[in-house]
Image: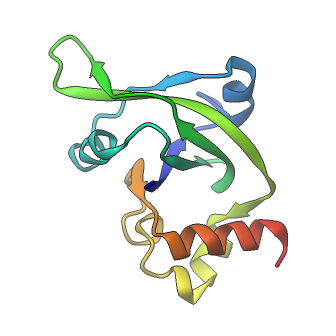
Amino acid sequence: MAKWLMKSEPHVYSWDDLVRDGETDWDGVRNNAARLHLRAMREGDEAFFYHSNADKAVVGIMRIAGAQKPDGPDGAWVKVPVQPVRKLPRPVTLAEIKAEPKLAAMELVRQSRLSVSPVREEEWALILEMSAGA
């Protein structure tokens, strides 16, 4: 299963909103590179939920809950259903991620404006360790 990072501004849609709703369509993405990533997602893949702007931190894990669907009237964009898996023991901030040399190649660091990006297995594991305080 692939791993991803998906950003949302917490005042628009937060981790707590996802937990309350139980499932939502991750929609409204209007960036060509992010669209390619959404199209590559498969049911069962997992994604970090990242609060952008104010918090700038990975706060939880979600699961891709089904197949992509068209997003918008022209069908050129896609959305995917997501469900919460669990909140991280503690948020891992962007500052912590940038300070970790092993995460220097992470798309979040290299292409900071990208709202949906892949996460390598070793990056995923390290962020989980950081969240646990290891």
User: Is residue 88 positioned above or below 80 on the image?
Assistant: below
Name the spot of residue 13 as percent of width and height, x first. 61, 28
**Measuring 62% from the left and 71% from the top, which residue is drawn there?**
125
The image position of residue 75, as x and y in percent, is 18, 19
| Viewer-proximal residue among 39 and 6 | 39
Please state if 77 lies on the left or on the right of 41 as rendered: left
Residue at left offset 57%, top offset 77%: 98
Residue 16 lies, in percent from the top left, at 75, 31
Nearer-the-camera pick, 123 or 34? 123
Count of numbered badges drawn on the protein: 0
**Residue 27 vs residue 53, the one in the foreground:** 27
Colouring style: rainbow
Pinpoint residue 118: horizontal percent, then vertical percent. Answer: 40, 59
Say if 77 sits above or below 92 in the image: above
> With respect to residue 94, does 22 lie above or below?
above
Apparent side of residue 40 relative to residue 114 in the rendered image (left or right): left
On screen, residue 114 versus residue 36, left or right, reads right
Whether residue 24 is visible to the viewer of this picture, yes or no, is yes
Q: Furthest residue to the top?
A: 73
* Lateral position of residue 2 relative to residue 11, left or right: left
**Residue drawn at 26 percent across, 16 percent down:** 72
Q: Quadrant of the N terminus?
A: bottom left
Quadrant of residue 14 within the rendered picture? top right
Picture layout, residue 104 above or below residue 10: below
- Indicate the quadrant containing the C terminus: top left, top right, bottom left or bottom right: bottom right
Spot the residue most to the bottom.
Answer: 101
Judge whether residue 51 can be spotted in this image.
no
Picture residue at 28% right of the left edge, 28% below the top: 78
